[in-house]
Structure formats: structure tokens, C-alpha cells
């Protein structure tokens, strides 16, 4: 049944390239191009041919409806149940093993993760060796899923995560004489998992699987939940490492030793342990982002299982850095200045002197206020350009776009939560002083910047690319000229002249401004990702929130909200790059 339906679907796409009015609207969201296609059908198709086309298409739509009902059967429910159960169990184990004061230790968590990693690798191998190689298994590819820049980012983060696992292996080997061998086995298994999963997602990210759909859905949700559990474990370890517990004369490294290595009497057998351990913590942010990238790509593959994608050309957009100047220069200046102030902040904080801590907070607050203020101003300019822009909104269903928007809004909630809790604490306590004023200003401006940036990115992702509108306008103008047969030669010449001139012309003012805004916002989000990802925690260095909410509650708020805020910045970088390409 599936094979016949697929053949009918593809045959009809080839035979009836001049679509009916209903199908034209679905395949080509641009209203200009849609009108042109409908007019072509009226001029070039006879009534008898149209009736045949309608009859065949009704049969194809009936088959598609049957297939869609089959695809949305028990497989979706079963895969969803598997995902939820793995996530809840993983969350419980990760939370329980955060400290060794409970019966669950890091060894138990790592055994659970090893089992998940092995099962996921087994499924990936089965899919690659058996399912993918069968005839009619992957008839369609989702051109929007797994773009090259996303796969390159996954590869880069994967390589750095692989390096982190090497450092972990070198560290845990020094504790084999007094600690569990599971702690060595886990990074070994995870390193192999990184290699297999990166290859799998690089090759199969665009697949729309049509065979073994239930098994494939379950395998993809296993992959999704495994990456999320690994992300939760990494975030928990990083949060414990970065969180300073007040009134305890305990260093950060000792707290991490207690959390991960169990008995503090267990000493490393070689001198390089501390070096490898510290190196691991600088690589944790990349491992965290890798897990989220992989989870997002697995989700898109899961949504594409059984999906019928119509064969139409996907527009290739090239990246031309020479198109912009002011945005990248300003963004690079912000990144350099942010790195300098971040290094100064870390140096002053480590001295643990009251005056130095205040100076560090002053530098950090001012730098962040300047960055979010400039981002808010540039976003407002971009939103004004959107109001003057006449591009149509994309109407085509796209799982990748839906996921981008969902992740963008959902991840921003973490930073929203921290900012609003800070606003309430500072206002309610009536705290005075320049540090409290700067902290309040930063929180208010961050809320404003997040809202504006979300609107700018979402609006940009749902607009038609400029080159699509140009092609649609060209097609309409050409069709209008074709009504007069004497002008056919002129039309051909005008087409070639348009292509030559449009490729060589400079960008219009609106396009250039949008690209400048996107380039600056992209670089600004990078520095706002770097600072918290690599250890900036003004939330714990400034005492107002801790005194108002008490340490336990405030630590929970920050350690839950901040990982989402960090991911929001990196996801914004990816989304802004996409907006830059289509602007």
C-alpha cells in the first residue's frame, strides 16, 4: 500500500507539474507567483484535461489521507511515552546524584547513561545498515532540516566534547585505585557515542523515513531523550561547580570533588589530574550545546517520519560577508570589549576582596547594560524595516521553523525568570547604591531586549526570502508580456538582462540594514553566551537576591533558569544567521 502510494504521489508530481489552483497555493506561498501559476493553467490546460487532473488528484489525496492516519497511529503515542519515561527517570537520577549525601551516587547515574548511550548507538547502527538501505525507505528529503551551518556547528561542538571526554578519561584513570571503574567507562562510551551520532546526524538529518516508521520513531525519541538526559547531567555538574555556597569555607574545586569523586580521601595517582579536571570545566559549555543541537535535530527527524514532502526546488542562499560592514565591525568591538571585561571580572572575583568584588560587579553590570541597550536599539531599527517591508509571510508547514520558534520562546523564559526575580528583589527591599541601581537597570533592559529580539527573529524567520520575491515578480512580468506574442523575444532578453543585473546590483537599503542588524545581533549574542557559559555568576556575587529569597531558593532559580538563558543566546545566534541569509 505504501509503495503504490509513493509511486502515485511522485508520478503525479512529474506528470502534472502545472498544478491546480489549490495546490499552487500550498507549494508556492508567494501570492504573486501563485496568481501567475493559476493564470498559466487557465491558458494552457483544456477543460477535459483539468477534469482528469482533478480525478487523479482526488485519488492521490485519498491515499495520502489514509497514509497520514496510519502514520499518526500508535507509533507517535508509543514513542512519546518512551521519551517521557526516560526523561523523568533521568531527571530523578541526575537530581539524586548531584550530592553524595543521598544513596544515589554519580556511579548509578553514569551506569544509567551508559545503558542509554549503548541502546541509542545500537539503534543508529540498525537504522543505517538495515532501514536506510531498503528500497522506498527514504523517498523524500526535508530541504529545510539540518542545514550545512547547523551540521558544521554540531561537528565543531562534537569535536570539543570529544576532547572533554579524553580529559575526563585521563582524570578518572588517576582514581582507579580507589574509585569505581564506571567513571572511566562512561567517558569512553560517550566518546564513541559522539562519533557515531555526529556521523548519523550529518548523513541522515534530512531523511523523511517511509518504512519501519514505528521503530524509527521510537529510536529517534530514544536519541532525543538520551541527549536531553546527558544535557541535564552536564548542566547539573556545571551548576554545582559554579555555585558558591555561603558560610562554608570550601573552595569550588573541593565542592566538585565531593560531588563527582565521592570520598575526598581518594587521591589522584598522577600530578596532571587537577590540570585535566580544570580543562574539562572549560569544555562543558560546548558539550552542553552539542547535546541540545543533537536533540533538536533528532526532534526534526522524528517529525519528518512518514512525511510526504513535495518535490520542488529549494533555493540555495549563499553567504556574502562583503554585503555588510557596520554591523560586523560594531559586533566585533563589542565581543572584544566583552571579553576584556569578563577576564577582569573573573580576576577580581577570584581575589575574594570586598572592594575588588564591587569593582568586578560594576564592570560587569555596565558592560552588559551597554550591550543590551545597543541590541535593543538595533532590534527596533530592524522591526521598523519589517513594517516597511512588503514580503509575504511563509505559509508552508515546516517542522524546522516551528521548532526554532518554540525553542526560542521557551529558552528565553529562563532569562525572563531570573530578570523578573531580580527586579522584584531589588524593588521590594528598597536597596540603594550604584550596584543595586545598575543591577535593576540591567534586569529591566534585559526583559525589553528579549521581547524585541524574539519578535525580530520570529518575524524574520516567517518572511519570504528576498530572492523568492524577485523570482516571483519576474515570473509575473514575463507572463504578462507573453500575452502579446510579438514581445516574446523581448521577454527572453529582459529575463537574461534581469538575471545579470540583479546578481551584480548592490543590496537595497532595506536589505542592507536588515543584514547589518542581524550581523551585530549575532555577535552580541555570542558574547552574552560566552560570559555566563564560562563562569560569570553575578547572581551569586551580588547579595541582594540571596538575602531576599535565601540561598537555597535563589540557587534553584538561577541553576534552572540560567542554562536555558545560555542556550537561548546560542540558539539566537543560529536563528539570526538564518534570518541574515534570507534577508
Image (cartoon, helix red, strand yellow):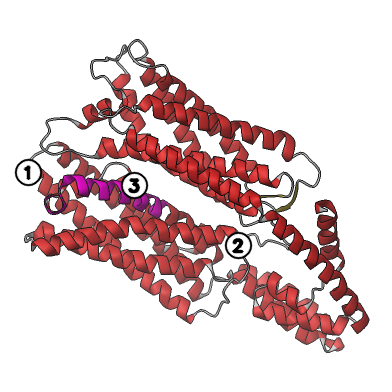
Toward the viewer: 476 or 75?
Answer: 75
Q: Nearer the viewer, mark 3 or mark 2?
A: 2
- Cα–Cα span, label 3 and label 1: 25 Å
- Cα–Cα span, label 3 and label 2: 31 Å
| Secondary structure, magenta segment, majority class | helix
Of pointers 1 and 2, the one earlier in the residue sequence: 1
The reply to whether the magenta stretch includes residue 564 is yes
Residue 308, visible in the rendered structure = no
Taking the spot 51% from the left edge, 29% from the top edge, the residue there is 115
In the image, residue 70 lies at what x, y percent?
72, 55
Q: Is residue 418 above or below residue 152?
A: below
Q: Which residue is mark 2?
A: 398
Packing grade of label 3 (10 A; few <14, some 14-19, many >=20) is: some
Q: Which residues are magenta?
A: 547-570
Packing grade of label 2 (10 A; few <14, some 14-19, many >=20) is: some
Q: Which residue is mark 1?
A: 354
Taking the spot 35% from the left edge, 47% from the top edge, the residue there is 563
Taking the spot 72% from the left edge, 44% from the top edge, the residue there is 212
Q: Which residue is mark 3?
A: 530
Q: Nearer the viewer, mark 1 or mark 2?
A: 2
Give the secondary structure at mark 1: helix
Amino acid at each position: 500500500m505504501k509503495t503504490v502510494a509513493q509511486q502515485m504521489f511522485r508520478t503525479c508530481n512529474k506528470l502534472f507539474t502545472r498544478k491546480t489552483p489549490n495546490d499552487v497555493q500550498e507549494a508556492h506561498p508567494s501570492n504573486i507567483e501563485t496568481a501567475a501559476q493559476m493564470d498559466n493553467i487557465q491558458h494552457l490546460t483544456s477543460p477535459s484535461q483539468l477534469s482528469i487532473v482533478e480525478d487523479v488528484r482526488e485519488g492521490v489525496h485519498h491515499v495520502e489521507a489514509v497514509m497520514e492516519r496510519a502514520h499518526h497511529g500508535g507509533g507517535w503515542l508509543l514513542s512519546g511515552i518512551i521519551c517521557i519515561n526516560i526523561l523523568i527517570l533521568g531527571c530523578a537520577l541526575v537530581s539524586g546524584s548531584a550530592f553524595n549525601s543521598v544513596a544515589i551516587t554519580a556511579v548509578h547515574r553514569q551506569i544509567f547513561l551508559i545503558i542509554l548511550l549503548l541502546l541509542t548507538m545500537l539503534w543508529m547502527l540498525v537504522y543505517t545498515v538495515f532501514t536506510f538501505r531498503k528500497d522506498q525507505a527514504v523517498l523524500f528529503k526535508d530541504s529545510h532540516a539540518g542545514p550545512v551551518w547547523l551540521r558544521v556547528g554540531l561537528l565543531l561542538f562534537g569535536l570539543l566534547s570529544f576532547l572533554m571526554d579524553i580529559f575526563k578519561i585521563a582524570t578518572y584513570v588517576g582514581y582507579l585505585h580507589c574509585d569505581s571503574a564506571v567513571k572511566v567507562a562512561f567517558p569512553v562510551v560517550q566518546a564513541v557515542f559522539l562519533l557515531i551520532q555526529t556521523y548519523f546526524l550529518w548523513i541522515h538529518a534530512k531523511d523523511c523515513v517511509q518504512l519501519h516508521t514505528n521503530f524509527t520513531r521510537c529510536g529517534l525519541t530514544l536519541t532525543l531523550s538520551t541527549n536531553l538526559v546527558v544535557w541535564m547531567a552536564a548542566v547539573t555538574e556545571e551548576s554545582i561547580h559554579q555555585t558558591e555556597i555561603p558560610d562554608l569555607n570550601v573552595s569550588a574545586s573541593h565542592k566538585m570533588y565531593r560531588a563527582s569523586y565521592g570520598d575526598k580521601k581518594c587521591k589522584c595517582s598522577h600530578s596532571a589530574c587537577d590540570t585535566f579536571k580544570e580543562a574539562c570545566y572549560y569544555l562543558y559549555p560546548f558539550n552542553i550545546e552539542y547535546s541540545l543541537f543533537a536533540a533538536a535535530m533528532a526532534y526534526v527527524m522524528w517529525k519528518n517520519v512518514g512525511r510526504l514532502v513535495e518535490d520542488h526546488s529549494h533555493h540555495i542562499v549563499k553567504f556574502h560577508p562583503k554585503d555588510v560592514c557596520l554591523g560586523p565591525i560594531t559586533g566585533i568591538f563589542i565581543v572584544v570589549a566583552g571579553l576584556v571585561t569578563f577576564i577582569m571580572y573573573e580576576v577580581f572575583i577570584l581575589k575574594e576582596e570586598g572592594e575588588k568584588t564591587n569593582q568586578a560587579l560594576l564592570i560587569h553590570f555596565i558592560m552588559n547594560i551597554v550591550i543590551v541597550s545597543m541590541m535593543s536599539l538595533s532590534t527596533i531599527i530592524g522591526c521598523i524595516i519589517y513594517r516597511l517591508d512588503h514580503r509575504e509571510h511563509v505559509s508552508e508547514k515546516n517542522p524546522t521553523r516551528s521548532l526554532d520558534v518554540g525553542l526560542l520562546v521557551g529558552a528565553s523564559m529562563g532569562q525572563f525568570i531570573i530578570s523578573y526575580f531580580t527586579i522584584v528583589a531589588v524593588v521590594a527591599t528598597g536597596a540603594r547604591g550604584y550596584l543595586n541601581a545598575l543591577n535593576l537597570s540591567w534586569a529591566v533592559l534585559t526583559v525589553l531586549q528579549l521581547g524585541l529580539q524574539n519578535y525580530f527573529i520570529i518575524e524574520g524567520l516567517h518572511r519570504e526570502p528576498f530572492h523568492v520575491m524577485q523570482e516571483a515578480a519576474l515570473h509575473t512580468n514575463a507572463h504578462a508580456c507573453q500575452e502579446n506574442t510579438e514581445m516574446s523575444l523581448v521577454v527572453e532578453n529582459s529575463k537574461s538582462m534581469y538575471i545579470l543585473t540583479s546578481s551584480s546590483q548592490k543590496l537595497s537599503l532595506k536589505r542592507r540594514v536588515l543584514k547589518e542588524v542581524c550581523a551585530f545581533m549575532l555577535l552580541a549574542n555570542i558574547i552574552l553566551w560566552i560570559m555566563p557559559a564560562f563562569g560569570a555568576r553575578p547572581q551569586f556575587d551580588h547579595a541582594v537576591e540571596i538575602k531576599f529569597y535565601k540561598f537555597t531558593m535563589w540557587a534553584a532559580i538561577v541553576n534552572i533558569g540560567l542554562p536555558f538563558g545560555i542556550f537561548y543566546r546560542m540558539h539566537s545566534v543560529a536563528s539570526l544567521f538564518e534570518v541574515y541569509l534570507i534577508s
